[in-house]
Image (tube, rainbow, N blue to C red):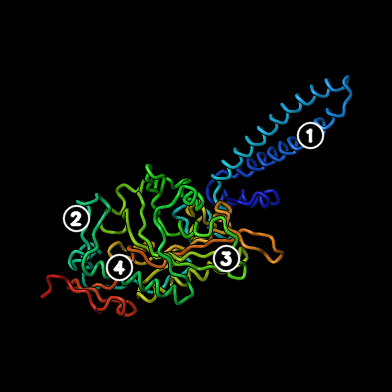
């Protein structure tokens, strides 16, 4: 959630952020009114309670003729104290409810607008020119015996699949390569739980506008995560971290689950938009003053992976209206997909500032010894979707696929060959 103290000092910052997101800027005034009302109610409650205690002490010392009057006054004050306490509680609940719906404040410099208003920061590599008609990733995957959508649908329904043979090996190689890179950069490897409590899912901001994307196990009151960002954000919930240990960098490998509500008819072919996939995700707790620079480092690590896999890609600065609830700034790396003749997202890295840690109560001690909320950041290092770009960009006319050199030690082969190739 956002910082109320900062809001009181500079409400225009939230108004500008809301405008950048295409949201209602008047929520800033609503929050200020509720905050002011809550604080006034608390002051009234505390004043009345102090008076009530004073009157209570006076009763035992009062003369018989004054005692009755004091008892009447004490009774009246008790009712007023109860009323003031209830009012303060009501306003606090209303304030908390409104706060929970307000997204993070957009970082200055991020583009305004919606999904299509991103800013292209850099394009790396040129799309390959084929001297044959390229096949899409599903046709290639079927020729290689790597992807089986038909049986995935038979077993689990639409948008499910089997990765088979070299497909399964390719994914494991890719994810292992990502994990190795992150560990070499100082990250602690993690395999987190993928079922989390409501407070963890809520704390990361995934039960707001995107709640319909999340799978819930009602009988257990648990949620399946759409990214290991969620359990990693909850890992230090309620803790005070040693300041000299920051940044705390973790890299999580987990299956991820998304309902893809609202995407009916989109990307129905192949494994671009599916309900279950694997992902390697970087997650960092750091000092708020270091978050901006850490964000740049996460982007650089993502680009390092893309460069190793010899993929043409572009880096985009995501517009305010497409940031999601928790992010203040987000950069995506989109790889070229030849058969679609467009760039598709492979990585995303977000600076969530102290938005998640305020909800999850993750702090560190500042130089003055006082606890401060940490900042959190996340970044994708590899997912199942990367297979799409690898197969399509490195395919040969006969349906074989040349394995990028950096991936070969993890996969154990230089070329993926079609099953029926003689």
Residue 286 is marked as 3
Q: In the displayed structure, does residue 375 sit left or right of residue 166?
A: right
> x, y percentage for residue 120?
46, 64
Query: Which element type, helix, strand or loop, lies under badge 3?
Result: strand
> Where is residue 374 drawn, in percent x and y?
59, 61
- For label 4, the residue is 171
* Mark 1 vs mark 4, CA separation in Å: 69 Å
Which label sits in the foreground, 1 or 4? Answer: 1
Q: Quadrant of residue 36?
A: top right
Question: Any mark on residue 98, and which?
Answer: none
Residue bearing mark 1: 53
Mark 2 sits on what residue?
A: 151
Give the side of residue 359 with respect to residue 134, left or right: right
Residue at 25% x, 50% y: name it: 158
Residue 4, horizontal then vertical, whole percent: 65, 49
Residue farthest toward the left in the current orientation of the protein: 422
Quick one: SS at disc 4? helix
Rendered residue at 51%/71% (across/down): 297
Residue 99: image quadrant is: top right
């Amino acid at each position: 959630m956002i910082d109320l103290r900062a809001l009181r000092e500079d409400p225009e910052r939230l108004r500008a952020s809301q405008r950048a997101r295409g949201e209602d800027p008047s929520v800033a005034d609503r929050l200020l009114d509720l905050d002011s009302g809550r604080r006034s109610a608390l002051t009234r409650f505390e004043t009345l309670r102090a008076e009530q205690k004073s009157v209570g002490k006076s009763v035992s010392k009062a003369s018989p003729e004054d005692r009755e009057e004091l008892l009447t006054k004490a009774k009246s004050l008790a009712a007023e104290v109860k009323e003031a306490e209830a009012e303060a509680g009501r306003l606090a609940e209303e304030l908390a409810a409104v706060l929970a719906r307000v997204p993070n404040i957009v970082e200055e410099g991020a583009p305004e607008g919606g999904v299509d208003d991103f800013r292209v920061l850099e394009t790396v590599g040129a799309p390959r020119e084929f001297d044959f008609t390229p096949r899409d990733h599903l046709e290639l995957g079927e020729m290689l015996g790597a992807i089986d959508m038909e049986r995935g649908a038979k077993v689990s329904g639409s948008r499910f699949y089997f990765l088979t043979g070299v497909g399964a090996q390719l994914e494991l190689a890719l994810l292992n390569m990502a994990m190795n890179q992150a560990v070499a950069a100082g990250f602690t490897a993690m395999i987190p739980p993928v079922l989390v409590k409501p407070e963890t899912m809520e704390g990361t901001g995934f039960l707001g506008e995107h709640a319909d994307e999340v799978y819930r196990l009602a009988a257990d009151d648990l949620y399946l995560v759409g990214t290991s960002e969620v359990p990693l954000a909850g890992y230090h919930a309620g803790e005070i971290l040693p300041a000299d240990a920051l940044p705390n960098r973790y890299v999580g490998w987990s299956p991820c689950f998304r309902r893809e509500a609202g995407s009916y008819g989109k990307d129905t072919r192949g494994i671009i938009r599916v309900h279950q996939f694997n992902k390697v995700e970087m997650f960092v707790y750091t000092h708020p003053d270091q978050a901006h620079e850490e964000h740049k480092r996460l982007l650089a690590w993502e680009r390092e992976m893309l460069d190793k896999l010899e993929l043409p890609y572009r880096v985009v600065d995501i517009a305010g209206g497409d940031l999601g609830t928790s992010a203040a700034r987000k950069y995506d790396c989109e790889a070229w997909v030849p058969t679609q003749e467009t760039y598709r997202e492979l990585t995303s890295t977000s600076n969530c500032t102290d938005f998640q840690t305020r909800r999850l109560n993750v702090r560190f001690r500042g130089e003055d010894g006082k606890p401060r909320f940490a900042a959190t950041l996340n970044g994708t290092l590899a997912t199942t979707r990367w297979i799409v770009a690898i197969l399509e960009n490195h395919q040969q006319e006969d349906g074989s696929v040349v394995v990028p050199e950096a991936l070969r030690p993890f996969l154990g082969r230089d070329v993926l060959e079609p099953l029926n190739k003689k």
